């Protein structure tokens, strides 16, 4: 049972890595910036290309130029977020 759990963890990690690489290779991106997978994919895409591809965030905005603390409302829920 323990061996199976360790194999499953490796499989999950492989699947996440494949998802990130595929997302980063797209010509445009739609995702959520509260997801670390989505943020990593967008950053990797920028690293590979040297420019930001067209993207849309479905929840909070992505900040490329510095830190700002702002209040956001998503689906009726308000929260404070620094990016």
Image: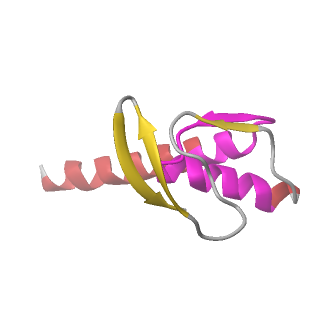
- 55, above or below 66, in the image: above
| Image mark count | 0
From the top left corner, tell me how far across and down residue 30 is, in percent.
64, 33
Please indicate whether residue 54 sits to the left or right of residue 24 in the image: right
From the top left corner, tell me how far across and down residue 45 is, in percent.
75, 52
- 75, above or below 32, in the image: above
Q: Is residue 16 magenta?
A: no
Quadrant for residue 57, please give it. top right
From the top left corner, tell me how far across and down residue 75 is, in percent.
39, 29
Q: Residue at x 20, y 55 (%)?
A: 3
- Comparing 33 with 74, the one in front is 74
Please indicate whether residue 20 sits to the left or right of residue 36 in the image: right
Please identify the residue farthest to the left as the structure is shown: 1
Please identify the residue farthest to the bottom as the structure is shown: 66
Check the picture and name the quadrant holding the C terminus.
Answer: bottom right
- Comparing 82 with 38, the one in front is 82
- 12, above or below 83, in the image: above
Q: Residue at x 21, y 48 (%)?
A: 4
Q: Range of the magenta residues?
A: 20-47
Q: Main secondary structure of the magenta part?
A: helix
What colouring method underlies this structural image?
A: secondary structure
- Comparing 57 with 75, the one in front is 75
From the top left corner, tell me how far across and down residue 46 is, in percent.
78, 56
Q: Residue at x 81, y 51 (%)?
A: 52
Q: Is residue 35 magenta?
A: yes
- Comparing 77 with 51, the one in front is 77
Please identify the residue farthest to the right as the structure is shown: 50
């Amino acid at each position: 049972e323990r061996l199976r759990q360790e194999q499953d963890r490796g499989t999950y990690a492989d699947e996440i890595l494949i998802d990130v690489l595929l997302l980063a290779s797209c010509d445009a991106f739609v995702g959520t910036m509260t997801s670390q997978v989505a943020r990593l994919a967008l950053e990797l895409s920028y690293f590979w290309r040297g420019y930001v591809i067209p993207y849309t965030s479905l929840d909070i905005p992505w900040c490329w130029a510095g830190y700002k603390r702002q209040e956001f409302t998503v689906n009726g829920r308000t929260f404070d977020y620094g990016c």
